[in-house]
Amino acid sequence: MIHSNGFRPLERQECLRLLAKAPVGRVVYTRQALPAVLPVNFALDTDSAVVLCTSAASDLVRAVDGVVVAFEADDFDAGSRSGWSVVVTGRAAVVTDAAEHGRLLRTGPRSWMPMRDGVFIRIDAEMVTGRELTGAV
Amino acid sequence: MIHSNGFRPLERQECLRLLAKAPVGRVVYTRQALPAVLPVNFALDTDSAVVLCTSAASDLVRAVDGVVVAFEADDFDAGSRSGWSVVVTGRAAVVTDAAEHGRLLRTGPRSWMPMRDGVFIRIDAEMVTGRELTGAV
């Protein structure tokens, strides 16, 4: 189905397939009562949660641990005015379980920035929405 | 200056120069008490405000008119783990002045989606921050 305004909603499975190919997404949250956004590399966990690695001392950890956030990835082509975007909305939590942390050290994403105090944040894929812009204009 | 965690903060002018080249950015706001994000094409106005065009009947207009939002654009290369991101934070407002609307019809962005009830939203560039990731890992 293509909406009259030129985009097609994506099913959850299509969204997750697209997310799995995206190298970078953006954590959307609130910092000091203002909307905030931070691009990060990430991976999808086996239960479709978004996993990212950041410094334990980061502002991000303080702002999002235990809080519902959004996570967005997209890929657009300006020439054809087409592309897709996917948004995952769910609770973010720092991984504190040692076994889980160990598993993610082996299988999870590695931060693009060097850090000695890396922690993993998981964002549960409670709500997954997406849309495809088909270049109808 | 390169921070120990591998990124370099960008000056306002550098941020605006990069923003001017980006075809797509993301409006970051709150919708029904949840963090929300929507990718859109945009242009920079002469006073550096971010301008986008959307449907007057859209959820976006209802959610952001008169509210402080963030607007993010970035460009990363996964191969070299380098790139940049810029965030503009400021008050969003629908352009209601007829002369302003007319000026933006001539000079502003055109929506990538067909619409008959297009309105312009301006996001004042009150706070402009950015950073460059230099691929130090």
Image (cartoon, coloured by chain):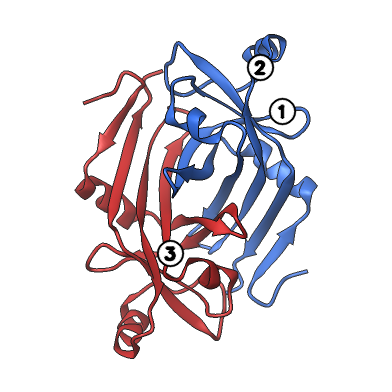
Chain colours: A red, B blue
- Check chain identity for marks 1 and 2: say if they share one: yes
Q: Is residue B105 above or below residue A19?
A: above
The residue wearing badge 3 is A67
Q: Position of residue B17 (x, y in %)?
A: 73, 42
Q: Nearer the viewer, residue A111 or B128?
A: B128
Q: Secondary structure at mark 1?
A: loop
Residue at the image position 29 percent from the left and 58 percent from the top: A125
Q: CA distance from mark 3 to mark 2?
A: 39 Å
Instruction: Output the chain of dot 2.
Output: B
Q: Amino acid at mark 3?
A: Val
The residue wearing badge 1 is B45
Q: How many marks?
A: 3
User: Which quadrant of the rendered structure holds the N terminus of chain A?
Assistant: top left
Dot 1 or dot 2, earlier in sequence: 1
Q: Residues within 10 Å of mark 2 (few under 14, many from 20)?
A: some
Q: Position of residue B2 (x, y in %)?
A: 73, 70
User: Which quadrant of the rendered structure holds the C terminus of chain A?
Assistant: top left
Whether residue A78 is visible: no
The residue wearing badge 2 is B104
Marker disc for residue B110 = none
The quarter of the displayed image where residue A77 is located = top left
Question: Mark 1–mark 3 contact, CB under 8 Å?
Answer: no
Residue at the image position 71 percent from the left and 73 percent from the top: B3
Q: Position of residue A28 (x, y in %)?
A: 49, 54
Q: Position of residue A112 (x, y in %)?
A: 52, 70
Q: Secondary structure at mark 3?
A: loop
Q: Residues within 10 Å of mark 1 (few under 14, many from 20)?
A: some
